[in-house]
Image (cartoon, grey):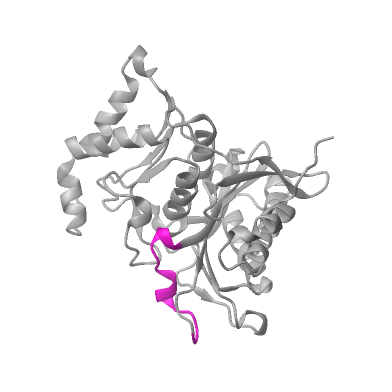
């Protein structure tokens, strides 16, 4: 009989892999897992209770918030506040960072960045959505943690993960020692190890990009899309186009089957659209730990300097060989974008 390992058991078993190994990170991951179960419960009832639709508010990005955006945000923040292992929470849905000032958190050493509900526009039409999280260890030793503790490069992450709420609910995470996936077993209410040691295939046959913005893409992206569409038996082209509008859903599929997810700069989003802290860095850390690659088209995502909580970035992420090919196209056909990005004036010419 196969022995099923729960998320809690697995975290405890692997605790020694973590350099500080005092149990705080294990408890922090447990708290995130509990909040994910609560959010999953509400998502599974969407349509039966009054939780669909827009809330009538906007977040700091200027995006209309869904009721479930707000609910998920509240649940994750509440779990992290009550857990005692987190000193600061930063969320895509909040303008500023949230400092946790409580007796149980006075010695907390961790900072959590979270996108509570990625792809929430899909909720109303019953398409997969997800949660993305990233964990850092605070840099300052004394006093209150500050914004400077939050603005760390992606290379400084100690853990990152995502939850995908789809045909089944999965939690995938890494602490820098490979990537493991856990599927929620509703009969026992536990995440159980289902995808050990996940690896991204070096090559794939799927590209994920919102081609509706094709006219506004840099030439390098346009050339790569055309490359994907050309017939070539040697490279198994043409590739298949798949795009759901949820980074988590698209990347989860590509992680298992191989593929590339692209969200480039456009004329209306010259610095990129996705958030570096809440989306790009955690997903890049996970993908790299699974053998994949993540780039802004020219440079490794994890090495980008973080200067703002809600900083945006372009991203090319997935199977290593596919990302490398896209980078070649960007360097060859859109060198002016790279030059202007690194001068701080990201403009498409």
Q: Position of residue 182 (x, y in %)?
A: 67, 45
| 144 magenta-colored | yes
Considering only vertical position in the picture, is 240 above or below 80? above
Name which quarter of the figure residue 211 lies in. top left
Q: Residue furthest top?
A: 233
Q: Is residue 105 visible?
A: yes
Q: Position of residue 23 (x, y in %)?
A: 66, 67
In the picture provided, is 299 more to the left or to the right than 238? left
Considering only vertical position in the picture, is 203 above or below 131? above
| 128 magenta-colored | no
Name which quarter of the figure residue 106 lies in. bottom right
Give, as a single range, the part of the protein colored magenta: 142-156
Considering only vertical position in the picture, is 250 above or below 145? above
In the picture provided, is 97 more to the left or to the right than 9? left
Q: Is residue 92 visible?
A: no
Q: Residue furthest bottom?
A: 143
**Residue at 60% over, 56% down:** 67
In front: 346, or 14?
A: 14
Q: Position of residue 271 (x, y in %)?
A: 28, 53
């Amino acid at each position: 009989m196969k022995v099923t390992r729960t998320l809690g058991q697995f975290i405890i078993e692997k605790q020694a892999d973590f350099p500080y190994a005092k149990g705080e990170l294990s408890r922090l991951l447990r708290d995130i897992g509990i909040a994910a179960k609560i959010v999953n419960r509400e998502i599974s009832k969407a349509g039966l209770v009054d939780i669909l639709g827009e809330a009538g508010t906007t977040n700091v990005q200027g995006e209309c918030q869904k009721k479930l955006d707000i609910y998920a945000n509240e649940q994750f923040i509440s779990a992290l506040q009550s857990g005692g292992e987190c000193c600061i929470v930063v969320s895509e849905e909040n303008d500023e960072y949230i400092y946790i000032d409580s007796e149980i958190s006075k010695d907390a050493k961790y900072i959590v960045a979270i996108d509570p509900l990625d792809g929430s526009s899909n909720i109303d039409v019953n398409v997969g959505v997800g949660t993305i999280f990233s964990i850092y260890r605070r840099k300052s030793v004394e006093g209150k943690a500050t914004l400077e503790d939050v603005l760390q490069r992606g290379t400084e992450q100690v853990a990152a993960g995502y939850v995908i709420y789809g045909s089944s609910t999965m939690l995938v995470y890494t602490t820098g020692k490979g990537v493991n996936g856990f599927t929620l077993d509703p009969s026992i209410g536990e995440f159980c190890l289902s995808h050990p040691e996940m690896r991204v295939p070096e090559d794939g046959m799927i590209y994920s990009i919102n081609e509706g913005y094709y006219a506004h893409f840099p030439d390098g992206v346009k050339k790569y899309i055309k490359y994907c569409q050309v017939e070539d038996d040697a490279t198994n082209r043409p590739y298949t186009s798949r795009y759901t509008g949820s980074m988590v859903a698209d990347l989860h599929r590509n992680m298992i089957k191989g593929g590339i997810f692209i969200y480039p700069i456009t004329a209306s989003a010259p610095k990129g659209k996705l958030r570096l802290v809440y989306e790009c860095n955690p997903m890049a850390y996970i993908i790299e730990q699974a053998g994949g690659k993540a780039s802004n088209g020219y440079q490794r995502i994890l090495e980008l300097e973080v200067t703002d909580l809600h900083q945006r970035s372009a991203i090319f992420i997935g199977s290593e060989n596919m990302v490398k090919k896209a980078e070649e196209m960007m360097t060859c056909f859109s060198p002016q974008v790279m030059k202007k990005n690194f001068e701080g004036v990201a403009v498409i010419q």
